[in-house]
Image (cartoon, rainbow, N blue to C red):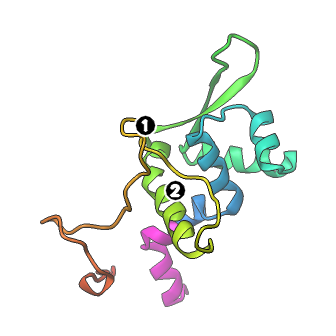
Amino acid sequence: MPSPADHNEKHCPVARSVDVVGDRWALLIVRDAFDGIRRFGDFQRNLSVSKNILADRLRKLVDANILETQAASDGTSYQEYVLTEAGLRLFPLVVALRQWGEAHLFKRGEKHSVLIDMETGKPVAYMAPLSRDGTYLEPVRTLVRKVK
């Protein structure tokens, strides 16, 4: 008999998302894909991850329709990993993690990479959930409607 926790996990979008992209390597691969990395060797060099772990995470991301493989853009026999539409939709998650890290994991004045809006040349504005009328939505103004 499934426990109540199993039932809650089954119906929780956060739990399902974490199952797919909640792993350190999966998130860093997605981050690197947003930065334009496409090839296995480039992911490996940038992440300093073992080949077996990288191959496993790439396979899982492809299976989850976050990445897809395609022939190399330069005509070589290599394959490249590119973000799918679902993968591109992870951008707000990556930005939110980045902004949380900037705010809570760096000392004042400590150098770190910065996400820049290419049109303005300025740092991307802080992301925050908004209500339908455009006002900031604080956690105390939300609730999760559980599946019964």
Q: How many marks?
A: 2
* Residue at x 12% of width, y 66% of height: 133
- Residue 111: x and y in percent read 64, 60
Please say whether residue 91 is visible from this viewpoint. yes
- Residue 45: x and y in percent read 82, 41
* Residue at x 80% of width, y 34% of height: 41
Bounds of the magenta span?
Answer: 1-16
Q: Main SS type for the magenta part?
A: helix
Please say whether residue 148 is visible from this viewpoint. no
The CA span between labels 1 and 2 is 17 Å
Crowd rating for badge 1 (residues with CA inside 10 Å; few <14, some 14–19, many 20+): few
Q: Amino acid at mark 1?
A: Met
Q: Which mark is residue 94?
A: 2
In the rendered image of this protein, does residue 104 appear above or below residue 36?
below
Q: Secondary structure at mark 1?
A: loop
- Residue 42: x and y in percent read 76, 35
Q: Amino acid at mark 2?
A: Val
Q: Which mark is residue 118?
A: 1
* Residue 12 in magenta stretch: yes
* 113 relative to 7 in the view: left or right: right
* 53 relative to 61 in the view: left or right: right
The residue lying furthest to the front in this view is 109
User: Which quadrant holds the N terminus?
Assistant: bottom right
* Residue at x 67% of width, y 63% of height: 23
Specify which label sits upstream in the sequence, 1 or 2: 2
* In the foreground, 62 or 8: 62
Q: Which mark is residue 63?
A: none
Q: Secondary structure at mark 2?
A: helix
User: Which quadrant holds the C terminus?
Assistant: bottom left
Query: In this rendering, which labeled residue sits more in front, label 1 or label 2?
Result: 1
* In the foreground, 63 or 22: 22
* Residue at x 61% of width, y 73% of height: 105
